[in-house]
Image (cartoon, grey):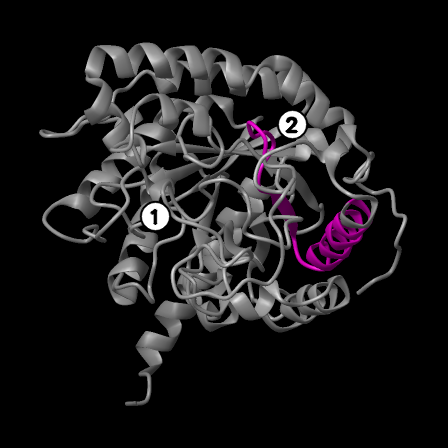
Amino acid sequence: MPSMSKFARKSVLGLSMLAALVQATAAANLNFDYGAEKVRGVNLGGWLVLEPWITPSIFDAAGDAAVDEWSLCAALGQDQCRSVLAQHWSSFITADDLNQIAAAGMNHVRIPVGYWAVQHLDGDQYVDGQLEFLDQAIGWARGAGLKVIVDLHGVPGSQNGFDNSGKRGAINWQKDNTVDISKSVLKALAARYAGDGDVVTAIEAVNEPNIPGGVNQDGLKQFYYDSWGVLRESSQDTTIVLHDGFVPTESWNGFMSADSGVWFVMMDTHHYEVFDSGLLAMDVNSHVNNVCSFTGQHVQTSDKWTVVGEWTGAMTDCAKYLNGKGVGSRYDGSFPGTTKIGDCAGKSTGSVDALSEDDRTNLRRFIEGQLDAYEKGTGWLYWTWKTEGAPEWDMKQQIAGGVFPNPVTDRQFPSQC
């Protein structure tokens, strides 16, 4: 690499000094100090972006063709889909849910939303109407003393091919004008909540862009830089959240760091131990050791604030439709090409109270181990607050059933990491 000229070195120095000055000024008004306080929170998954495993009844009622939100609306038609979703949006999450989250000692909720809530594209099967409920949730969060991370969970063309992006199948983000549309959606969200900085302290540029699956990392980096600029048009002190794209979080070191002229940048990494047969075969001791090692290798080594923005107490992939509607589970061998490890009875659907005593104990221990591990970084947000009956994933049930600590700082299995 050619050596940097004196002029270039002075320019970089001047830029970093300017950034430091702006950051210091903004920090004086920062409504949550991610450098000093621990994020303790939960995702409101399956609410404003549907997932078949969180609310299987909605998808079962729509027939076999409904495997994601796009095909759900295609199967039902626009009017019926709007009616079904409006009923869901108005009942699945309420002010009482946010009050319960705060009462358990949490300080954040992460709220997924799709681009289609903001902008309708030609040919879209989606319906809109989600933003009025997001507005309402921000008001509830204010009343409960919670901060909100608004998470752009689905972008045009799908950034990962998962049903949680709104459309299962091929990854077509970064084609045509999909990136520009994504930036316009972020711009609209940032402007909409610019006056709610006391609550909306962070916006996530895109959830789980799948680099191993084909998302171009250089293009993603440019999108992240551009998204930072889009947020700064509306606010100097909103933190931008960058998902690591399923590559090692520390591999992003040096990118958009404070000395590159940007400020208030947080990395988001997601950690699950249920989508691999080798991991599923492990006992709870191995699972706890894994998350402790994961944090040491990939969270504490990051040069930016780093939050584990999705994780679970689950140690099986038994939850109905977890791997996709119509797809089986690795744990019981019903997933194509897998061999049975154990029985999914009581874990596919059911309640926390119906789990065996051993399962309940192991669930609590694994949850506590992750809480301790992830607080070695910036903190954590559990996936997810509520389901229709996935006991290994449902924090609301887990708190009520005594397998998720309440308050979240309580420990029956202390100092596991």
Q: Residue at x 64, y 21 (%)?
A: 98
Image quadrant of residue 144? top right
Q: Residue at x 43, y 34 (%)?
A: 235
Q: Residue at x 81, y 39 (%)?
A: 405
Magenta range is 360-389
The mark that comes first in sequence, 1 or 2, is 2
Q: In the rendered view of the protein, which quadrant contains the C terminus?
A: bottom right
Task: Give amino acid for label 2.
Answer: Leu
Query: Percent position (x, y) of residue 51?
Result: 41, 35
In the image, residue 333 lies in the stretch drawn in magenta: no
In the image shown, does 279 or 300 lie closer to the viewer? 279
Q: Which mark is residue 162?
A: 1
Mark yes or no: residue 30 visible: no
Secondary element type, mark 2:
loop
Task: Give amino acid for label 1.
Answer: Phe
> Which residue position is annotated with label 2?
146
Query: Percent position (x, y) of residue 161?
Result: 29, 50
Q: Residues within 10 Å of mark 1 (few under 14, many from 20)?
A: many
Vertical relation: 125 (above or below) 110 = above
Q: CA distance from mark 1 to mark 2?
A: 29 Å
Q: In the rendered view of the protein, which quadrant contains the N terminus?
A: bottom left
Q: Return the residue found at the far bottom.
A: 2
In the image shown, does 20 or 80 lie closer to the viewer? 80
Image quadrant of residue 375? bottom right
Residue 375 vs residue 279: left or right? right
Query: Percent position (x, y) of residue 327?
Result: 38, 48
Closest to the camera, between mark 1 and mark 2, is 1
Secondary element type, mark 1:
loop
In the image shown, does 365 or 27 lie closer to the viewer? 365
Image quadrant of residue 236? top left
